[in-house]
C-alpha cells in the first residue's frame, strides 16, 4: 500500500506519518494489488 500524505497548516513529522501508516495498515488485508491512500491532515479549530 502506498501512502500519499499532505498537511494543511501542520508539519508532517515522522511520528504523524508512522501513526497514519499504522492505522491504515489494517486495511491492507481487504485490498489486493497496488493501492494508493491519499491522506490529508489538517488542524481544526476548537470552537467553545
Image (cartoon, rainbow, N blue to C red):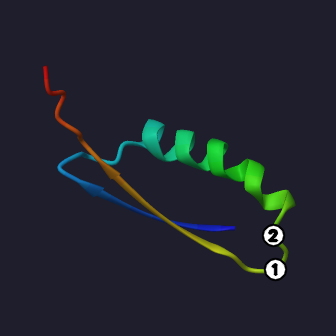
Pick whichever, 30 or 36, lies toward us: 30
Task: Tell whether 2 sits left or right of 48.
Answer: right
Q: Quadrant of residue 29?
A: bottom right
- The residue carrying pointer 2 sits among few (fewer than 14), some (14 to 19) or many (20 or more) residues within 10 Å by Cα, namely few
Q: Residue at x 23, y 46 (%)?
A: 10
Q: Secondary structure at mark 1?
A: loop
Q: Residue at x 84, y 63 (%)?
A: 30
Report how far apart the C-alphas of labels 2 and 1 lie in the structure.
7 Å
Q: Is residue 35 above or below residue 16?
A: below
Quadrant including the N terminus:
bottom right
Q: Which mark is residue 33?
A: 1
Pair 2/1: label in front: 2
Residue 2 image position (x, y, % from top left): 62, 69
Pick whichever, 12 or 45, lies toward us: 45
Q: Secondary structure at mark 2?
A: loop
Residue 5 image position (x, y, % from top left): 43, 61
Task: Tell whether 20 sits left or right of 22.
Answer: left
Q: Which residue is mark 2?
A: 31
Q: Is residue 7 above or below residue 33?
A: above
- The residue carrying pointer 1 sits among few (fewer than 14), some (14 to 19) or many (20 or more) residues within 10 Å by Cα, namely few
Residue 43 image position (x, y, % from top left): 24, 41
Q: Residue at x 37, y 42 (%)?
A: 13
Q: Residue furthest left?
A: 48
Amino acid at each position: 500500500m502506498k501512502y500519499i500524505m499532505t498537511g494543511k497548516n501542520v508539519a508532517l513529522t515522522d511520528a504523524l506519518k508512522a501513526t497514519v501508516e499504522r492505522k491504515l495498515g489494517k486495511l491492507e488485508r481487504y485490498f489486493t494489488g497496488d493501492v494508493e491512500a491519499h491522506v490529508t491532515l489538517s488542524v481544526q479549530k476548537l470552537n467553545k
